[in-house]
Structure formats: C-alpha cells, structure tokens
Amino acid sequence: MQRDPHVKRKQWDGQDIQTLRRHLGLTQRQLADQLGVRQQTISEWETGMYLPRGASSTLLSIIAEQADFKYEAVPPEKQARP
C-alpha cells in the first residue's frame, strides 16, 4: 500500500506523546522498547527537549492509528519548514 505524498503524518509534541503513552497504558520504558529507543528519549520527547522525527514519528503515528488514538495530522501547508 502506497501512502499519499500529500498527506503528512502528525508532528508529535511532548503532550501528545505522553497522552498517547497513557492511552496505551505504557510506561516510558515500555513505549521506548516498542519504538526501539531509550527510555531517556521518551522522557526528552515528553518534556519537549527534543521532538521525534523520521521513523520514530512515523511509528508513533502507526501505533496511534492502530490504538484508535484520535489526533489530527498537520496539513502540508501548516508544517514548519526546517
């Protein structure tokens, strides 16, 4: 299945990540294990020190969709450019 290049995945922020994690009933370590990152990385995302990008951001979106977690993806014209 090919993804529409005009549909962008959500840009996750700390609050959204923490809300998703709690929705899933997971600890930071458990979510980290699912994503293949360190627990410290989850903590840094949740506190806003860093934001997930690339594969991590995509995996968060996939996990959220599978868990029926409601969020809004950012339309392409609203996304910040690096």
Image (cartoon, grey):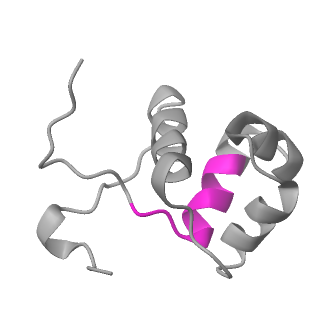
In the figure, 67 relative to 70: above or below? above
Tell me if 6 is positioned left or right of 26 in this view: left
38 relative to 16 in the view: left or right? right
Q: x, y percentage for residue 23?
A: 66, 43
Is residue 53 part of the magenta span, yes or no?
no
Residue at the image position 84 percent from the left and 40 percent from the top: 30
Magenta-colored segment: predominant secondary structure: helix
Place of residue 22 in the rendered image (x, y in percent of width and height, measured from the top left): 72, 49
Answer with left or right where residue 61 lies relative to residue 51. left
Residue 2: where, in percent of width, then height?
20, 25
Closest to the observer, 61 or 4: 4
Residue 13 part of the magenta segment = yes
Which residue is at 14% across, 37% downward?
4
Front residue of 22/61: it is 61
Q: In which quadrant is the C terminus drawn?
A: bottom left
Q: Which residues are magenta?
A: 11-21
Residue at x 57% of width, y 70% of height:
51
Q: Residue at x 68, y 40 (%)?
A: 35
Counting labels gives 0
User: Quarter of the image containing the N terminus?
Assistant: top left
Q: Nearer the viewer, residue 29 or 22?
A: 29
Place of residue 72 in the rendered image (x, y in percent of width and height, measured from the top left): 32, 55
Residue in front for this viewpoint, 39 or 27? 39
- Figure quadrant of residue 79: bottom left
Residue 42 found in image quarter: bottom right
